[in-house]
Image: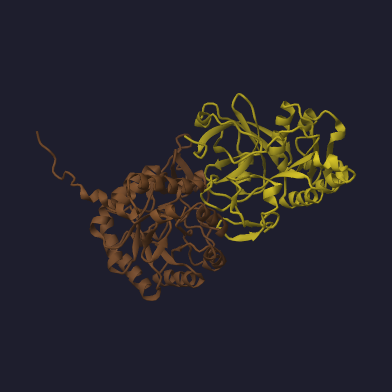
Amino acid sequence: MSNQLKILETEISGLKLKSPLILASGILGVSYSSMKRVIDAGAGAVTTKSIGPEPRKGYKNPSIIEIYPGTFMNAVGLGNPGIDNFISEIKKIKELNIPLIVSVFGDTNDSYISIAKKAEQAGADAIELNISCPHAEVASIGIDKDLTYSLVSDIKKKISSPILVKLNPNVTDIGEIALSAEKAGADAVVAINTVAALKIDINTKRPILSHGSGGLSGKAIHPIAVKKVYDLYKILKIPIIGCGGVFDWKDVIEFILAGASAVQIGTALYQGPKIITEINEGLTNFLKENGYKSIKELKGLAHEFKTQEVPDFD
Amino acid sequence: MTENSIQTVKIKKIINECDGIKTIIFNVKDSDLMQNKKLPKSGQFVMIWVPGIDEIPMSISGYDEKGNWSISVKNVGECTNTLHELKVGAYIGVRGPLGNYFKIPKEKLKNIFLIGGGIGLAPLKFFASELYKENINFTLIEGAKNESELIFVDEFHKFIDKDSNVSFCTDDGSYGLEGFASDIFKNIIKDYSQEQLSNTIVYTCGPEIMMYNVFQICEKYNIELQASLERIMRCGCGLCGLCVLDPLGLLVCKDGPVFSSNELRKIKDFGKNKRDFSGKKIPLNY
């Protein structure tokens, strides 16, 4: 067991992870008790649901549905109990001695700061900035490099914990926004949030989600996320956390080869927390069989290969 | 498609069970729901989408081999009120079957009790039909606010061979005995021998306070219990976490809705707390 832990150990901006698998925001992140199950299954860190200034019910149902096997679409609309009701949950997770990332959102830079401060005081080890929920108003920050810079640099002045910035894939140039976050002092980026999408029921002829459009997650977005991580690795100095469609250990390896230092897992948990245990086992076996002493050795290896830039003619 | 994908189907038949409760039957034979080849089991639920209104979890109250599934709905809010207004031929969305189910005891137990309150009788009627198919006798205790809210009386009589094994009670005494289902249960078992008690199992669904009372009695007499719980949920499949039960982190949608004594003993939220749509913990009867 100790061997397995060592080979999977990694580090993100000072956070020591016993496994590169981090619970993604929005999944099972309402109560300490469901996050404990994810930790017990072997997660290296957990991210809470995005927490805002006050209780918010979000969009009505249908708000989370499966589109294809393993691919989901959601429009929860940042439903959350509000930071003051959430402090007790943060304190209980802290007792479990696993890095805790609190995801926050606000309506102004100051409200982000005040929530992050409360979370930090309650015990958060890192803050993830949700500037990218594709079906809520905060998306406006994550699609603009100047707003992103302003928010991240303001937060960095007041918060000493590592700041992770979750990136919105629904932009023309994700690199420009990621660079802006890095320049403002972000400690890492998480790529990617869900991909804007729409599902229409052909019988009733109406969009199914109550909000209409939603964010796609799971299997269908994995190759999109790998591409974003690959592109970002070429231009960023700060670590990248891959997020999107991790269902088995191979998906994790792929992210790391593309340049991720760790990954987040969310949608796949509909199969139960045991999937995390299985992925850790699969990763350990793969690394041992191929003679690696640490998963860190694989980081960015896909970049060693030249890809064809100019097509062949004739 | 999977059980977590919404399929829209037409309402085929509507039965008025009583004032305020309707059974809605829809056929899933030609929908993608049948591609899963997953037949519902009693205790399982479906997420029912009323287009333009909301999507809510509902117990399955029965099905047949022709692909007719049914839910039984009490009009208690915006979504269920709209469901009551829908006519045959209207579309509703269905996801399911979801969650776990009542488990028929492997060994032949002599005393099987079904204790239900109000609309909680819906999955118990389904369970009774499964017991009947297996030739297993049981005792039913059904409670309701008053006579006009007692449901499935004829159906249950069909599944039970002896009339002495059926007890109806109402809060106001307008039908059957006056009082609560849990009190009637206590009265029946109080003279049981140790052997009879260890030969007893209880299945319950209804208002959580009723189930909590039944649980206390079962604990006192060391009787095994399976209770079907209800919580607010978004996904119905283990992602949103709104239906979490502290401190074990069990999810009503995935680990439940049916929980056994072993679990109920450790669930501090049982009979006390639920989470609202924001995820905030609130008292059960808020």
Give the percent coordinates (x, y) of residue A249.
Answer: 40, 45
Q: Residue A166's image quarter? A: bottom left
- Quadrant where the C terminus of chain B sits is bottom right
- Residue at the spot x=73%, y=31% of the render? B131
- Residue at the spot x=33%, y=71% of the render? A153
Question: Which residue is at the front of the view, A241 or A197?
Answer: A241
Q: Residue B12's image quarter? A: top right
- The colour scheme used to paint the residues is by chain
Q: Residue furthest right?
A: B191
Q: Image check: B7 left or right of A242?
A: right
Give the percent coordinates (x, y) of residue B19.
Answer: 74, 41
* Image: A13 above or below B184: below
Is residue A297 in sight in this rendering? yes
Q: How many marks?
A: 0
Color used for chain A? Answer: brown
Q: Image check: A297 left or right of A200?
A: left
Give the percent coordinates (x, y) of residue A26.
Answer: 47, 55
* Image: B122 above or below A253: above
- Residue at the spot x=46%, y=72% of the render? A117
Give the percent coordinates (x, y) of residue B125.
Answer: 72, 35
Q: Residue B279's image quarter? A: bottom right
* Image: A259 above or below B22: below
Query: The chain drawn yellow is chain what?
Result: B
* Image: B8 above or below B76: above
Is residue B114 in sight in this rendering? no
Question: Which residue is at the front of the view, A171 or B140?
Answer: B140
Question: Which residue is at the front of the view, A148 or B199?
Answer: B199
